[in-house]
Amino acid sequence: METIQGSEPQLLVPGKPYPVTLLGYPAELLSPRETYQSVSDQIAEEPLHHRHQKVWFLGFAIASTMLMVFGIAIGYLLFRGPGIWGINIPVAWGFAIVNFVWWIGIGHAGTFISAILLLLLQKWRTTINRFTEAMTLFAVICAGMFPLLHLGRPWVFYFIIPYPDTMALWPQFRSPLVWDLFAVSTYFTVSLIFWYIGVVPDLATVRDKARTKWKRILYGMGALGWRGSAKHWTHHQSAYLLLAGLATPLVLSVHSVVSFDFAVAQLPGWHSTIFPPYFVAGAIYSGFAMVLNLILPIRRIFGFQNLITVRTLNNMACVMLATGWMVAYGYIMEAFMAWYSGEAFERYIMWDRAFGDYGWVFWLLMAVNVFVPQLLWSRWVRTHTVPLFLVALSVNIGMWLERFVIVVQSLHRDFMPANWAMFYPTIWDWLTLLGSIGLFLTLMCLFIRYIPMISISESRELIAQRKEGRL
Amino acid sequence: MNAEERAAVLGFPSQVPIATEEKALYGLIAEFEEHDRLLSAARRAYAAGYREMDAYSPFPIEGLAEALGHEGSSVPFFTLVGGMAGGLGGYFMEWYSMARLYPLNVGGRPYNSWPNFIPVMFELTVLIASLSALVAMLVLNRLPQPHHPIFNAPEFERASIDRFFLCIETEDPKFERGGTWNFLEGLEPLKISEVWDE
């Protein structure tokens, strides 16, 4: 055993390739060999030299094929109308709303990592925040498409935007659907600003490392003439911190507003005050799962093990375990409140959830979203990439199933038995879901190809802090 | 004027081509290897009476702006103003459209049903505050600015990678070529260069 000097004691234990804390958790934030030069070279290499061309093209080919499927699915939808989906009365909100809630939830981890963990001084977020913020942007783009596609006449979506129009109509500001428009569009705009302000100094690094004229011009335009002067940094850091402060309540509000779409309705299974916190916890849960699903392969392909260390993976898995239990608490409370309310309809919908026609979806949800993630109690699972990847995948599927249960199962049994009907997805439902994943992955591929995917300037700050012994 | 004559005037030999009408000296720049060296250099330069100067670093350095005598950022002020404008403007829009322009009785709720107006008001507060923070940051930093004389400094591309620079500008009342050069040499930098504005 060997002790490494630092602000917190780190031990080298035989059998572990990384230093650990006194309790045996991975301790390393960044490989000790890194210098300002080495992190700049390593991270700026992909945008400039495109070293992993073959793997990238393979990924991009798959993603853009799925994107074309999305194009076809949307084209046919616009041609024929939402009747191509399995939706009908009473299940008028099918996959479109399930996918909307799923995607926007995925986005939440990005803001959680970049804003909330920044305010909480969690240094392990440094090497993943750029990537997860990009994930947020792309997930919100995918999410935002679904309510529009679901309109039936998406080209008149602007009716919901308040402006003094010639029809003298105004949107209904008492409606959660209007709140949703404001929440999602604000969320996208603020995430974009936050991400771009963070990326400007790194674009300057890429500009300064570029050796061809066009790269220098294009990255130079993105960098806006950033010089890294003390004056620049003062305003930059101030704006960055303020945006983190603004994004923190924002991210909590967005999924709360999404949950109002359900909770404000009087439908049994939806009309519940636990929805806002339970949705926010679920959002962060699924978002961390998606971050892990993306970052584990990318970390290996691009060789970022030295920057995205096992400590980061372990911490992300711990956040997943904690938020997973909050979600499980939500499930328990839903069932308890249904029973405790003494309300026949509430009790029935809960009973039907577990033992009705969609009962198998519910038990599958319990299995993949509550029981499988308990594997994260094991440190071995948290620190090994393949099991961690599989658990994260299970959570992603589970969170999608959760939204399916909430949307479809609650709708298919309302107050009037005459209104009861099943929902069966059509091929177009599935292709639209697949296509939206294609859109997401295509944007992700373009991002990792053209933008430094790890914050270079913040990694340098970590190195400087290590030199000062503050890490 | 030839190179020797210029060296006699400047007080030091210069590699830079002889200045023409279009060229003007922007300042003298010193290069450092570590951020704490830059920080102490900035403190000493401020103590020596230099005010028109700026430091360049690949990451934000705590206390550097104060050491250079720069004022704190006014981005928070503009963000606050933007946030208040967004919140009040948002509520006004909701009240004016729901209670005045298009009054609609929904389940007997009052026209000015303020609890229902909070979510949109909150979102607009955050939206306008964030846009204000972005615009304030860009305007106060004079960005976008494609060209700046400092980019002519030799090795300046390393300011965004691994080097730390301190530039004393000719606009400073205490600036004087030979004297400032000597002062910078006293800070023991890796290198001192002239920065020309073309």
Image (tube, coloured by chain):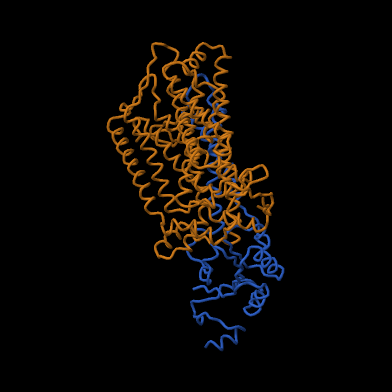
Chain colours: A orange, B blue
Reply above or below: B170 against A340: below
- On the image, which quarter does residue B118 sit in? top right
Where is residue A320? Give x, y as percent: 55, 36
- On the image, which quarter does residue A34 sit in? bottom right
The residue that appears at 43% across and 65% down in the rendered structure is: A211
The residue that appears at 60% across and 85% down in the rendered structure is: B9
For this orientation, the residue located farthest to the front is A14
Left or right of residue A382: residue A402: left
Where is residue B132? Give x, y as percent: 55, 48
For this orientation, the residue located farthest to the right is B47
Where is residue A456? Give x, y as percent: 53, 55
State the count of labels: 0
Reply above or below: A248 against A398: below
Q: Nearer the viewer, residue B157 or B178?
A: B157
Reply above or below: B56 against A371: below
Q: Nearer the viewer, residue A242 or A57?
A: A57
The residue that appears at 70% across and 68% down in the rendered structure is: B44
Residue A45 in sight from this viewpoint? yes
- On the image, which quarter does residue A53 sit in? bottom left
Q: Nearer the viewer, residue A363 or A384?
A: A384
Residue B1 in sight from this viewpoint? no
Where is residue B185? Give x, y as percent: 65, 76
